[in-house]
Each structure stands twice: as C-alpha cells, then as structure tokens.
Amino acid sequence: MKVLILAGGLGTRLSEYTESIPKPMVSIGQIPILMHIMNIYASYGHKDFYIALGYKSEVIKDYFLNYSKINRDFSINLKSGKVSFFEKEIPMNDWNVTLINTGINSLTGKRIKLMQKYLNDETFLLTYGDGLSDVNIDSLISFHENHKKILTMTAVRPPARFGELEINDNKVKSFKEKPQLHEGWINGGFFVVEPKFFDFIPDKNVMLERDPIENLTQNSEVMAYKHTGFWQCMDTMRDKILLENLFSKGAPWLKQ
C-alpha cells in the first residue's frame, strides 16, 4: 500500500529546532524522526511513500535529493571537485519517495485532499510526521479489511493530551479534540483509509481531526484498532528527550 505522511506543520512547541528545520526532520539518534516513521512501514514491506510538505519543505526535499551523499563515505579533491564514494549499503535504496508541497498554511485535511491525485483511488496508509509506535501494520490492515468501513484509526492510551475516542465494540462512536479523557483511548494516527474518505473532506482549509473524521464517525464509518503497545509522539522537547533515551536503549518502535 501507499503510505501518506503529513509533514507540513509548523511544530511551534519544538521551536528550539523548528525555527530552522521542519519538525519531521528533528532527529532521534541523529536520524530524522521522519525516517524512523518510514522505517516502521518499510519493515512491513510498505515502501511507496507520499510526503505532504509545507513548512520549510525545501529542507526535506534537500535531504532526499542528497540522501546518498549524506549517508555514504567519500573522498573529495578540493582542487578538481572530483568526488569518489566508498561502497556502502544505502538502507532505503528500494524506497519510492514522492515529495509534494501542499502549502505552508494548509491544515491536515486540506493536505490530504491535495494528495488525492497521487494515490490512484486505492486504499492507503496515513500517519503524522511526528509519532512512533510498534503497532503491527499487518494486523492493522487485516483489521481494516475485515470490518469494511472507510477509516481505521489506531487508538492508544498515553497521558491525556490529545483527542479522545469513545469506542463501543471497536466502532468509534464519538471523536472530540483534546477534552478531558474518560476511557483513556486517543487518536494515535497510523490510519488505514479507503479512497471514499476524500468525499468527506470539504473543499476548504480544514483539519483532518475535525469535520472529516467527525462526519465519518456520525456515519458509523470509523473503526478503532486498539493498540496497547508502545506509542509516543514528539510534540515537545520533553518528548524528544524521552525518545532519545529510548533510542539509546534499543528503540521500542522498531520491528523485532
């Protein structure tokens, strides 16, 4: 399946870094969190990536344009400018990465709508550019295929800082953005999406988490895949420090 990653936000709560680079390029263990996310999907065989860019899109574009140079050792003659690369395996040499600028001021719903023409009317995977998890992508897809609804979102149970899901028999009954938690389940990203979802995104600048998902929920077309394993977003400096520590101990989001 194609993987759509939302990577265009301002990341204002990580301003220590995002004044100069976009949030998906903030590193965990000297590797951009965007690459960690892509590695999660690639470990399950999903290597066709579509990245919706916005804020400082040129930084992400430059990273992939120069990926081989960044990740290989080389020698250079400063007089002639001749570069000789040493042999080294490039871990993403079989990935396809499509980079699309969806606008600096676009909200998540509009970004997805603008990516529609690149997804070829197929079921696709969707996530944000700042969250890591050990969610089993194969099981997530199987769950989605079995219930035959338009949208599956991964539900997780971290501290109460995000939008709350009310779930009954795995069906999402309500979705509220950042209230006080009752049951403790929140939207953890890692979606599976049917192309009919685009019909629920209005032709205006909207957030994915507002009109589109709320309207789908009212039509009983949203299901929750409950994930009780590791999940952590990188929203603040505290989150980055936590993820750095976890990476140094073995990165629990990596497929074992």
Image (tube, helix red, strand yellow):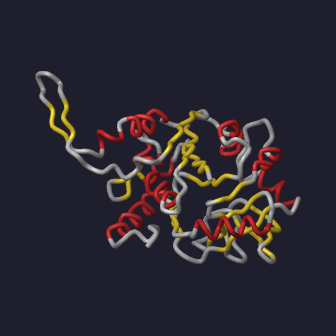
The percent coordinates of residue 200 (x first, y second) are 82, 47
For this view, does 57 lie left or right of residue 195? Answer: left
Whether 31 is drawn above or below 181: the answer is: above
- In the displayed orientation, state which residue is furthest to the top: 80
For this view, does 198 lie left or right of residue 127? Answer: right
Q: Quadrant of residue 79?
A: top left
Whether 150 is drawn above or below 52: the answer is: below
The percent coordinates of residue 44 (x first, y second) are 53, 63
Whether 113 is drawn above or below 43: the answer is: above
Question: Residue at position x 71%, y 40% from top?
Answer: 113
Q: How many marks?
A: 0
The percent coordinates of residue 224 (x first, y second) are 72, 69
Question: Residue at position x 43%, y 73% from top?
Answer: 256
Question: Residue at position x 51%, y 47% from top?
Answer: 12
Q: Quadrant of residue 152?
A: bottom right
Foreground pick, 59 / 183: 59
- In the displayed orientation, state which residue is furthest to the right: 219
Foreground pick, 15 / 26: 26
For this view, does 207 lie left or right of residue 5? Answer: right
The percent coordinates of residue 99 (x first, y second) are 53, 37
Foreground pick, 179 / 234: 234
Whether 142 is drawn above or below 27: the answer is: below
